[in-house]
Image (cartoon, helix red, strand yellow):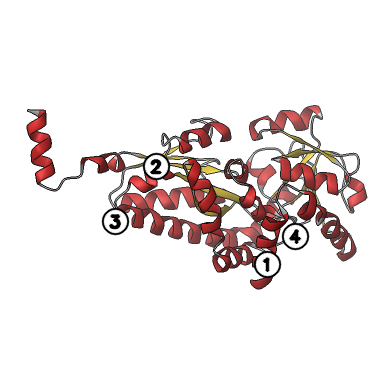
Amino acid sequence: MMRKLHTVLLAAGVVLAAAPALAEVKIALDSPPNMERAGSYVWAHTFAEYLKSKGMDVKEYARGSLGGEAEKLDQVSQGLLEVSMSDLKSAGKIDKLVFGAALPYLFQDAAHMDRAVAAAGLMDKINAAVTKNGVRVLAITTVGPGTGIFNTKKPVHKAADMADLRMRALDESQIALFKAWGTTGTIVSWKEVPNALQTGVANGYLNPVFVPVMFGHTDFIKFFTDAKVTQSARLALASEDWYRGLSDAQRKIVDDGAAAATKANRDWLKRTEPKMMDEVKAAGVAVVELTPEARAEFQSLSKAVYADGVLTPEQVKIWVDAADKAR
């Protein structure tokens, strides 16, 4: 009976291999489900709702429920998880070119980064490498304005003030940056950050201004320097097996959904950025605005990671050329 049914379906032009593409699309979140405060969630939820509006079955999974960054990357690469909101390090483990999005003082703002990525075809260059390992970058997302220096100990007015601060690092690129500033870094997973800050394993971190407020760190984070070091970039990753298994029409829905989600993410940033500084001040965090001289010093020291960081000289040139042409 099953063989006869199989023959009938094939005769009717039904492609059985396409069936998995109609299954539930799982999206692993990396932030609280808050459309006002969490830029990553703005991207994920907008993407999910777009796919739903086109008839696809989508479910959002809470941050941490499908594992940490390494576990999510493994699931995506094996085709077990369709979409993951992830850090740069996830794709960077496969190919380091994506780390260029976090080069210090390369971009003026998120809009400048977007222009550079589009004009230079950087998304295609990144995906040419990472898709070989089962992962596709759907979008570079932003979780806030340019990153600044948070710490538990003292105001940071100049690079020399960093010397006795041990900073929490997201990845090896931040380790290299802190070394260039004359201090040290230690890689700590995000879920371990509160304990690290309270015990002195780390004294601070590099993040957009809203982070300690949203994650409840203002009981021990007391100082913020608005250094605007890097763009607060993260990634929307997809399983390449899943993406390639979609029909042309379904793949267009996913691509259009990613574009709509990216626009919503950038519109969110423009709308909420002015409120973020007021919120962190209201939470009792002292804010330092760098003098032009101090900012220039941070910029100069940071250039060391262009030559001695995680990227090859050729990869650095790709990003610097793109940024220069998009100014």
Which of the two labelled residues, at mark 1 and mark 3, occupies the earlier sequence position? 3
Q: Identify the element where label 4 is drawn.
A: loop
Does residue 302 sit above or below 7 in this rendering?
below
Sequence-wise, the earlier of marks 3 and 2 is: 2
Question: Which residue lies at the image location 9% right of the left edge and 34% below the top edge?
Answer: 5
**Disc 2 and disc 4: Cα gap in Å?**
36 Å
Residue on which disc 1 sits: 321
Q: Nearer the viewer, residue 254 or 268?
A: 254
- In this picture, is 318 found above or below 194? below
Is tag 2's residue or tag 4's residue first in the polypeptide sequence?
A: 4
Q: Would you name the residue on which mark 3 appears?
A: 249
Mark 2: few/some/many CA within 10 Å (<14, 14-19, 20+): many
**Mark closer to the observer (1, 3):** 1
x then y, percent, for residue 46: 43, 53
- Disc on res. 241: 2
Task: Please name the residue that numbered disc 4 is placed on.
Answer: 105
